[in-house]
Amino acid sequence: SSGINAEYGENSFRPVSTMWVSMLARGGQSSRKTGIGQRILATLPYVKQEIPIMIIFRALGFVSDRDILEHIIYDRNDQELMEMLKPSLDEAFVVQEQEVALNFIGARGSRAGVPKNKRIKYAKDILKKEMLPHVGIGDFFETK
């Protein structure tokens, strides 16, 4: 407890970042039991609303459904898991580009009236520094 944080170097008093991921049922009791029909949402630090997890993947540069699913599902024959993810993919269908996803996140974290380029920068900063601090703050967004 001397203030040394191995991830950030000596004398770093950076607080621990918190990110929550939740599954929310759309339907009644039956969908809650099976997991079918649930949306997966994440709560990011400094963002006022929950963000659909697929939009976070798109903001990180995994834009196609196939790219996203390859990072979640190891067995493509796992139909149960595919069905569980379908509502989340459907929810994020309107956001098909990385910049749109970043703007979506930034608009829910910054005050009203902030220009689009600043909202996008805000979202990138949150993802780099708060969600994936162990990756560092290099420009990993430009990998695709």
Image (cartoon, rainbow, N blue to C red):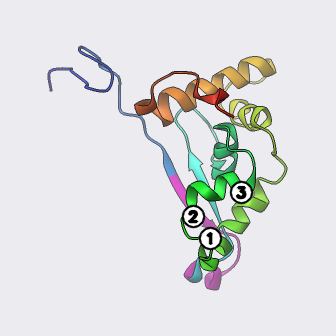
Q: Are marks 1 and 2 in contact (CB under 8 Å)?
A: yes
Quarter residue 139 falls in:
top right
CA separation in Å, label 2 and label 3? 10 Å
Local packing at callout 2 (Cα closer than 10 Å; few below 14, some 14-19, many 20+) is few
Local packing at callout 1 (Cα closer than 10 Å; few below 14, some 14-19, many 20+) is few
Q: Where is mark 3, residue-wise?
A: 66
Between disc 1 and disc 2, the foreground one is: 1
Kind of residue at badge 2: Ile
Residue at image point 61% right, 54% down: 41
Residue at image point 25% right, 26% down: 6
Please tell me whether mark 3 sits on a helix, a strand or a loop.
helix
Nearest to N terminus: mark 1 or mark 3:
3
Local packing at callout 3 (Cα closer than 10 Å; few below 14, some 14-19, many 20+) is few
Nearest to N terminus: mark 2 or mark 3:
3
Q: Is residue 74 above or below residue 18?
A: below
Horizontal arrangement in the rendering, residue 32 relative to residue 14 (left or right): right
Quarter residue 135 falls in:
top left
CA separation in Å, label 1 and label 2? 6 Å
Q: Which residues are magenta?
A: 21-33
Image position, residue 93 (x, y; %) = 82, 54
Q: Where is mark 2, residue-wise?
A: 73
Kind of residue at badge 3: Arg
Q: Residue furthest top?
A: 11
